[in-house]
Image (cartoon, rainbow, N blue to C red):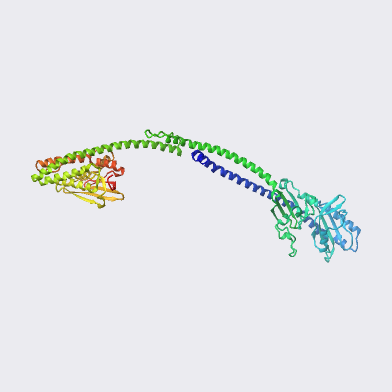
Amino acid sequence: MHKWLTTSLQRKLSVVVAASMIVPMLALGLFAFMISSNITEEKTKLTGSDMLKQMDANLRFMLEDIETLSIFLIGERDLQTYLTGPEDNEAKRTELVGRMTNLAASKPYIANIAIYPERFDGRLSTATWYENELPPAAAEAIAGGVKTWSGVYEIRDYAGMEQVMTLFRPIRSIYDFRRLGWLAISLDERELARNLESPEFGQGMGKVELIGEDGTILSSADKSRLGQPLDTFAPGLFALIPGGVAAADDGGEPRSNRLIENGSVIYGSGDSKSTVLYRREPLTGWMLVGSVPYDQYQAENRYILTLTAMVVGVSVLACTLLIWFTVRRITRPLRVLTRHLSRIDPERPLPRFPATSDDEIGRLGQSYNMLGAHIERLKREVIRGEARKKEADLRALQAQINPHFLYNTLSSIHWIALMSGERRIADMVEGLSDFLRISLNQGRDYCPVEQELAHIRNYVRVQSIRFPDKFDVEYIVEEGLLDKWMLKLLLQPLVENALIHGIQKREGIGTITILIQPEGKRMHVMVMDDGLGMSAARLDEVRQALSLPGVEGTGKSQDQAAMPGAVMAETAAMMATVAELNAGYGLRNVNERLFLHYGQEAGLTVDSREGEGTQVSFSIPIMEGSP
């Protein structure tokens, strides 16, 4: 797998680009699914909370209406008169029962209104119940003498069994506040259950029940659960709801004043897991508890997951095709370029790359074509440079062979001059002989700097005899460079050029200065004169001539003084020959030799000012020995 991947740029790009696009897309799909799932759950909670709020509003309306009705009845003057009488008054009883029946009939959620006198037996009731026993909560309320709501309990009338919850309230005299009896208003559980029914709660999968303060189920669609503790069917749920504990004993403060009115909890685990929403009724402390099973979320989540998987799958397929198409278009020209590079023949030019685009690959192809053309040009220049180097070496060899013949001849002339007593002629011939001997240098191209300077001194010795009191030569040389090696015969043409073209044409004595100093790892050489110099136009011509490799100079030496005698004439003729030989190479030949042996960085630099002088310099690497 690793080898298959690493041997192809197309496969590597495809894998990298696909991973960089598909992995974030899968992560985005998973993130969208999780967000959608959370939104679905929160939406269900929000919708359920709104429904519970509406149910609570209806329940509160019923409870507040019953509360208001109870206050109205216990303060009703005829009822006060009836209850304060010494005995039961049949006419008043009938009148009161009729009025209470009309009130009960106008409110469908009131199952019965009953009055229990304190002073005599009997009960005033709007309903015919076969069982007249009070529920345990009513007995406790009567014993405590406070208003209270009973739990749900069962009664029987002519229509059958009925479940009710009753508000018990003491009736007290409006004059002396003594208790006259009890008012009981019963709430029909069927009307409460109808209020709790909502096909939209939990999308038809949820259920809502009314739970009392003690955790008893007061109203439910499942009548078999009425009156049973909630923990019987959902152990621990009542305690899980904040405030779902036994009544506090801290002074009788209503629990509804201290507890959270609404919220949600998660109950159960696994398949039985559900979201439980609750809302507390502050008047009674009852709670509306609605539960939505997680199966409902899972059904919606499965739909969302399927939809997300389809979208991600289509996107991945589209991305894969797009990546394949794009990578193929990118790598096709690279494969062509690779084939070109793998088929390179050193003997033939590089094949051209068809660069048809302006993008990076197109520019790479253009650079490849430029590289091929540059390589061809370099090959031609190398071939031409080698030919020029061999030609220059041949010319140097010829220059060595001719002085060799002259050297033998001059040695004979030197001994003849000594035997004839011509001391000046002997010194001149000896200097010329040493000059030619150093020029030969045993056939080697390189010599120490000290030997090159000795060569210059011999040349100056000869020329000072020809041109007495015409020029001086100053040497400024770093001692550490004397034993370093350099290409031979570089300084003499420069000194000769300074003497002939600069010093001889001026009046008085001129000075030629030779400066050799180190500059880092290179040796800087400069030959300066204080002669006539060059005009700007002439300086441009010289510089242009130096910039054209392979052009030989044509300068010639000039005689400025005559030497007495036949020997002097012969010596002058030989000196003119040497001058003609060296000046023939001139500045351009020195420049070309520097290029050939040291490279482009070693070319001559010429600077001159008319009437002030000229300086010629070059820089070569410092060499410890002969190459």
Q: Position of residue 32 (x, y in %)?
A: 61, 45
Based on the displayed image, in which of its 4 quarters is residue 101 positioned? bottom right
Position of residue 356 relative to residue 125, above or below, is: above
Residue 553 visible in image? no
Residue 210 visible in image? yes
Disc count in the image?
A: 0
* Residue furthest bottom in the image: 176
Quadrant where the C terminus sits is top left
What residue is rendered at 91% in x and 62% in y?
87
* Residue furthest left in the image: 420
Based on the displayed image, in which of its 4 quarters is residue 599 positioned? top left
Of the pair 363 and 430, the residue shown nearer to us: 430
Of the pair 497 and 157, the residue shown nearer to us: 497
Q: Position of residue 76 (x, y in %)?
A: 83, 60
Position of residue 6 relative to residue 118, above or below, is: above
In the image, taking residue 289 as reference, residue 537 lies left or right, namely left
Q: Position of residue 266 (x, y in %)?
A: 69, 52
In the image, taking residue 252 as reference, residue 570 lies left or right, namely left
What residue is rendered at 68% in x and 45% in y?
298
